[in-house]
Image (spheres, rainbow, N blue to C red):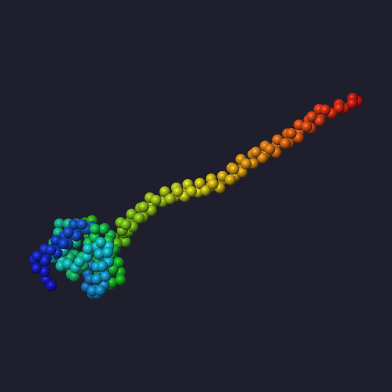
Amino acid sequence: MSLNLDGKKEVVAEVAAKVAKAQTMVLAEYRGTTVANLTKLRSDARAKGVYMRVLKNTLARRAVAGTSFEVAQAHMVGPLLYSFSEDAVAAAKVVSDFAKTNEKFVITVGTYNGKLLDKAGVQTLANIPSKEVLLSQLLGLMMSPVSGLARVIAAVSAKKSEGAPEVVAAETAAPAVAEVAAPTAEVAAPTAEVAAGAPAAPAA
């Protein structure tokens, strides 16, 4: 169904609003792809924050005019599915993953940060970890030294706890040694007294 002038303006305005917030755009030819598969693709795209729509190329050119995405205007030909994402990787990943299992779905070009990307460039972008994954990895790196320090402290504490009974045993043993030593001295004293009281040996 052909759009009237007002309908075309609405489409351009809607897409332009998405373009204003997007970092990445990916274009793909969908001819020959089943409706069921395209429906699933759109559902996956929505779940990952990707705006996806089949557009008339003339309207798409108007929507991206004056933006960093206009570098792709010359490639806006044929039946195309347009994908935009605020996340730098999301659109490229959703489209690339779908293309792996749908041979008739062909990535043509993409754009990121004002640069035109060919199919290989889009796939390379798709393989970059998402922001959430990168943040998770960064958090892991930040926590790693802390975890290591905690393990060292725990090990030292455990070692001290193991050594504590030895100290107590040594302290407990000390009085016993003293008590044993004291009677020995007492026994030695009478012996000295006996020796002192014994008659002197007769002179030769």
Whether 65 is drawn above or below 169: the answer is: below
Residue 175 appears in view: yes
Quadrant, the N terminus = bottom left
Q: Nearer the viewer, residue 181 or 17?
A: 181
- Taking the spot 30% from the left edge, 71% from the top edge, the residue there is 101
Q: Quadrant of residue 83?
A: bottom left
Count the marks. Answer: 0
- Taking the spot 13% from the left edge, 65% from the top edge, the residue there is 58
Q: Quadrant of residue 127?
A: bottom left
Residue 11 x %, y %: 14, 64
Q: Quadrant of residue 122?
A: bottom left
Residue 196 x %, y %: 81, 27
- Taking the spot 24% from the left edge, 68% from the top edge, the residue there is 42
Q: Nearer the viewer, residue 173 or 22?
A: 173
Q: Nearer the viewer, residue 71 or 147?
A: 147
Quadrant, the C terminus = top right
- Looking at the image, the residue that sits furthest to the left is 5
- Taking the spot 42% from the left edge, 48% from the top edge, the residue there is 146
Residue 92 appears in view: no
Residue 104 vs residue 172: left or right?
Answer: left
Residue 44 vs residue 71: left or right?
Answer: right
Residue 197 x %, y %: 82, 28
Residue 32 x %, y %: 23, 74
